[in-house]
Amino acid sequence: MSEIFKSIIAFFTTLFMLFTSPGQESHTVINKNFSFTYLEYPAEAVKTLKDWGITEAEWKSRADAVGEVFTQAQGYEDINGIVVSPYYKVYVEGKSVPVYATTVFVGSTQKGELHSFSEIYLPKGANCSFNFQINSENVYLSDVKVLPESLNLKPTCSAYVVNTRISKYGTYTFLFNNGSQSHSYTLFVKEQVDEEQEIANLKTQYGEDRVHVVEKGFYPMEYVSIRDGSIIYYLKQGAYLLANHKFDIMSEEESNSTIEEGASADNGIGLTRYPFLNFFNCNTVKILGNGVIDLSHLDRHERRGIVFTFCNDIEVRDVKIINPPEWSFITYRCNGVKIKDVDIFGYRQNSDAFAICNSQNVTVDDCFARSGDDLFDVKTLGGDENAISKNVTFTNCIAWNGKARCFGICGEVNRPISDVTFKDCAVIYHDATWNADRIPALAIIVEQGGGSISNVTYENIEIYRASSRAIGCLILNNDIGNFNIENINYKNISYSSSLPNKFASNNMTTNKLSANLENIKYNGLPVVELSPSLFEYDNYATLTIK
């Protein structure tokens, strides 16, 4: 199809959608009183692929699962991690909004793709009902679906134009062409903040010397490390922090042997190189504002992203983390943590999103993660008898995972973990299949023991598509005994998956595993009616299904 012909179709389709929009409110009237702002990155940091001198195919291929993992997941310095989207233009109430894109990974194909996104801000308390349109010049669009499905959004779609009406804050992910993972797009709709007023309030509360403001602009830098301090960083909309490459890490041996002077003394988990943002033994740390942290230039394992160890009173809000080379966001031995509206895009192996380790009184709310390992997880990595994880809550979070697990307690349970809740969350895709028992979407997977797990709740969770197991609760290590997994509750879970859910305690009489399941639906049908084919469990797992 010629470009001219496609343009003609797009033009007339746009007119048709604007003036008819069957089944929806009319799009003929543009609300001139509608007020919003949008995220815009600095031009020197975010360019088109053409300006970078890189083709779409070349950039996507860097996320392909081919070759040695350290080679496949190397950093690159010939392009930044965010570009102008090559696919879409979008409009809010008829006004053009910037569209960006970054590389991601699709488990079913083992290939890289581009995920496009925009972000807009609406005044607090405002009537946020608005017309929203996606225009594509080079991607044919059909059978559009907006996820999570609980948003109940029913857009109209014709050839190269999508129209819908959005009426509340939230994260809206659009899939096209029968749920394809190619050409995905996410709109982040957030509350508008008066940056100057918020900064003034912070300075009044904490003192001007403790509040550090990063203006909109491009900031290549090595790392920031704060020890025994108290600090507030405010990244204004469009502040773009880029981590500079320093160490060539091409193998596990180089990762283990490359030492950065002073690093091991300035964190509580034995890291031998500084994380990009490192906070150790601090009280009251805030990272606020709609800035971005781009880690694309770093080699795999070169640095971790944001790391808090032995800190209290932490707040992180609104930032984005792009293409982390290892764990993106870590808390270890922390107390009083609030994480809200933080978004993570990546693809590299071990680029776990939110790792809440040996920490207490933590909330993670309204966050989005599509990255290359576990996404929203709780662990205990060792430490003394007080190094527990307790009272951790994830709400309104969205996971998209092609390599590992989406929500859960994952891997290391060296100390007790208790009172963990995942509520009102969604899985878009979970299509990792390399080890069904080890990587379910909703996971309680014990690979290292020594602790226990109790009082864990999954409630109001939807899983659009899981290519492996939707739910898994297992002790995988045959050497683990005397381990208890108790009072695990699954309530109001809807899912589609390719394999049965599984509960197993390694057939050891000294281990205990008990779980309760209520109102669980597989493809819309209650599992109580279909349970024989939907569950695997051993003789030492006690399940109650209602």
Image (cartoon, grey):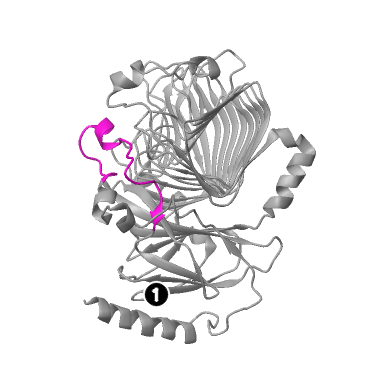
| 118 or 222: nearer the viewer | 222
**Residue at position x 29%, y 44% from top?**
63
User: In this figure, what is the number of numbered marks?
Assistant: 1
- Count neighbours of disc 1 (C-alpha within 10 A) and say few if under 14, some if 14 to 19, many if 20 or more: many
Task: Indicate the quadrant containing the N terminus: top left, top right, bottom left or bottom right.
Answer: bottom left
Residue occupied by mark 1: 161
Q: Is residue 331 left or right of residue 115?
A: right
Q: Position of residue 188 (x, y in %)?
A: 53, 57
The quarter of the picture where residue 135 lies is bottom left
**Amino acid marked by disc 1:** Val
Q: Position of residue 394 (x, y in %)?
A: 58, 41
Majority SS type along the magenta span: loop
**Residue at position x 48%, y 59% from top?**
118
Is 96 within the magenta? no
Residue at the limit of the structure toward the front, as seen here? 44
Find the magenta span and give its range.
62-84
Q: Is residue 204 left or right of residue 69?
A: right
Is 64 within the magenta? yes
Res. 411 visible in picture: yes
The quarter of the picture where residue 31 lies is bottom right
Q: Position of residue 246 (x, y in %)?
A: 38, 28
Res. 331 visible in picture: no
- Depicted 511 relative to depicted 455: above or below: above
| 15 or 477: nearer the viewer | 15
- Depicted 50 relative to depicted 137: above or below: above
Q: Is residue 297 left or right of residue 23?
A: left
Q: Is residue 252 left or right of residue 472?
A: left
**Residue at position x 74%, y 51% from top?**
197
Q: Position of residue 180 (x, y in %)?
A: 32, 59
Tag 1's secondary structure? strand
